[in-house]
Image (cartoon, rainbow, N blue to C red):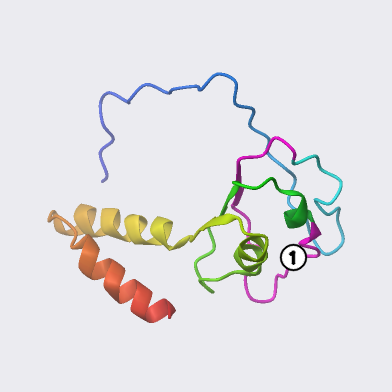
Amino acid sequence: PISMPKRRPPLKIFPKIDFHVLPATTHRGPTLDAFDFSQTHLLINATSLGMKNNPWPSLDFVKKLPKGTLVSDIIYNPKWTPLLKAAKKQGLKTHFGYGMLLYQGALAFEKFTGRKAPVMAMKKALLKRLA
């Protein structure tokens, strides 16, 4: 069994930052083209959009993201997802999703073996596999 820490760290809420959870788009549903992104600083795709056999219906909304926006895609295969490619084309900062996979694997390794995970070796192997 996995034991949870007895005391959780405090949740910090940052003032003056608005968080918006946007509905997932689908082939049949709405796109994000109508959303106002003028105050966006961070956009995270935490859906399966962009994976094989699940393309984005439209990435036109990326053109409306302000300069300096960081675009993160939790999908890790392909490394350069359609969303990240579109963001890069607009000159936006990008963040790959393989970190989540890497650290989930590291945590699982530590829980199952009781040893510290060799994170750098795991990262090297992961990036080689995703190349």
Camera-side residue of 61 and 11: 61
Camera-side residue of 114 and 59: 59
Task: Identify the residue at the far left of this view.
Answer: 115
Camera-side residue of 30 and 108: 30
Secondary structure mostly taken by the magenta-highlighted segment of the chain: loop
Spot occupied by residue 80 in the image (x, y as percentages of width and height): 55, 71
Spot occupied by residue 42 in the image (x, y as percentages of width and height): 59, 43
The verdict on residue 47 being magenta is yes
Instruction: Say which residue appears at 60% left-offset and 69% top-offset.
Output: 81
Instruction: Say which residue appears at 81% left-offset and 43% top-offset.
Output: 35
Kind of residue indicated by mark 1: Trp
Element type at mark 1: loop
Q: Quadrant of residue 113?
A: bottom left
Q: Is residue 73 visible?
A: no
Spot occupied by residue 120 in the image (x, y as percentages of width and height): 22, 64
Magenta span of residues: 38-60
Does 107 sit left or right of 99 as displayed?
Answer: left
Q: Is residue 23 visible?
A: yes
Q: Quadrant of residue 58?
A: bottom right
The verdict on residue 28 being magenta is no
Q: Quadrant of residue 112?
A: bottom left
According to the picture, the residue beneath numbered tag 1 turns out to be 56
Answer above or below: position of 2 versus 123: above
Instruction: Say which residue appears at 80% left-offset and 60% top-offset.
Output: 60
